[in-house]
Amino acid sequence: MIEIILVFAALVVAAWWIRRRIRMLRVRRAEAFRQKALNPPRRARKATVWVLHRVFAHRFLWRPLVGSVRMTDPAPVARRGLVRTVRIRIDRHLLIAGLTGSGKSSTARVLAAHVLAAGGQLELWDLKPGGPEAAVWGGSARCETSPAGIVARIRDLLADPARDGSHLVIVIDETSSLVRQLTAKQFDELCSLVDIARIYNIHCWFGCQHPSRENLPSAIQANVGAVISHRVRSKVESGVVFNDPAWAPHELRGPGAVLVQEGDSEPVRLRALWLSPERFKALPGGPQIPSSTPVTDPVPLIKVPPPVEAAPVELTDNQELVCLALELADRPLPAKAVTEATGLPQNRVSDALRSLVARSVVTKDPDAYPNLYELAPANKELDR
Ligand SMILES: Nc1ncnc2c1ncn2[C@@H]1O[C@H](COP(=O)(O)OP(=O)(O)OP(=O)(O)O)[C@@H](O)[C@H]1O
Ligand SMILES: [Mg+2]
């Protein structure tokens, strides 16, 4: 009898112990899942992506286009995963944004290769000192490397936008340099060209390293048909490029990572196709228009002559308010602070600042981010 009781007790203890173990295992598994969800194995994922991109590097190389190619055909620009190719229409104005070294130039070359294959004309406006991109594009594109050359070219195109009716793509390597160096009148001429361009088969691709409302004015952005963005520096710059928090190019990592927005496309991380400068130079060149300035020319800056001290400067009401705010602050201010100080709408303040900078009433520190504005020394005691 005692043996039966002992066996029964042992069975009860064993059942209790097994139930407890099972419950513990369940709790541990749930905790492991929770931990995994909270801390995704980022390093492992990054390493896998890195290995995949090295092993399958050839999948991300640009391939020469075969068969007849037309400007209206979507051009391959990136890969989604290893297999799917993403294409975009390039017979429109494009914005190609991204930090230095993020892959803007490679993307522009990939798209330009399509233009060459389609028999279109290419033109490069490169204001970087020494025109480094012009050295790569010189064989297949007309290159303008000085503000004076660009201004003359804008006027030529405005005078005869139809030309021979062929497709002309103008690649502006750094839009902010161009916007900064044009006077208000010259900038208006550029905007007029951008406005009418598409009717005459002229397409502008705007490269931009640090997009901001100042160096990518709404007059340009409103005409852009598709946006290609490599990594940008901050969330603010992402907002300028896409104006939609779902699109976050500041979270991209590594050269070649890219987001492409065309129509109602989704914000999917893509890998841009890579076309090296050497392979681009070796492509059969397209029809060429001679440059108005040799590409090796040193780049002269258009400097608006400093205002003559004695001459009174005619200012609009908004410009006067902006000057007053800068004078009262007595230190360089970003555009946002000027907007707050004047109480004017942001676009009015941007217009006023741009025009004041062009007339050398106000100086702009382009190296500061955001740009800082200050009354020019000669105008500290402005006779308004
Ligand atoms: N699609 C790509 N895939 C892999 N690597 C790339 C890709 N694009 C660019 N890179 C790498 O990044 C480097 C810089 O690229 P690129 O010159 O196109 O950048 P960028 O944005 O034009 O820079 P910058 O503003 O200085 O001209 C290249 O030399 C290359 O090593
Ligand atoms: Mg570049």
Image (cartoon, helix red, strand yellow):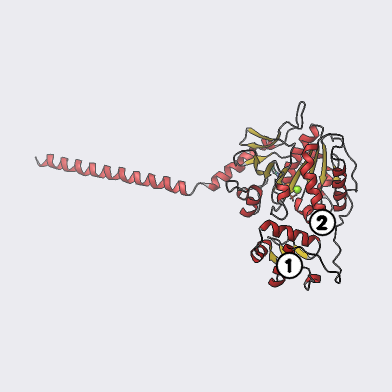
Name the mark on residue 183: 2
Residue type at numbered disc 1: Cys
Name the mark on residue 323: 1
Relative height, residue 212 to residue 142 (above, below): below
Residue 223 picture location, percent across and down: 72, 44
Task: Pick out the residue farthest to the front.
Answer: 317
Give the SS element for disc 2: loop
Relative height, residue 345 to residue 12 (above, below): below
Comparing 337 with 42, the one in front is: 337
Residue 345 picture location, percent across and down: 66, 58
Asked whether residue 66 appears in the rendered view, the answer is yes
Residue type at numbered disc 2: Thr
Residue 310 picture location, percent across and down: 86, 72
User: First in sequence: mark 2 or mark 1?
Assistant: 2
Which of the two discs, 2 and 1, sits closer to the camera? 1
Corner quadrant of residue 313: bottom right
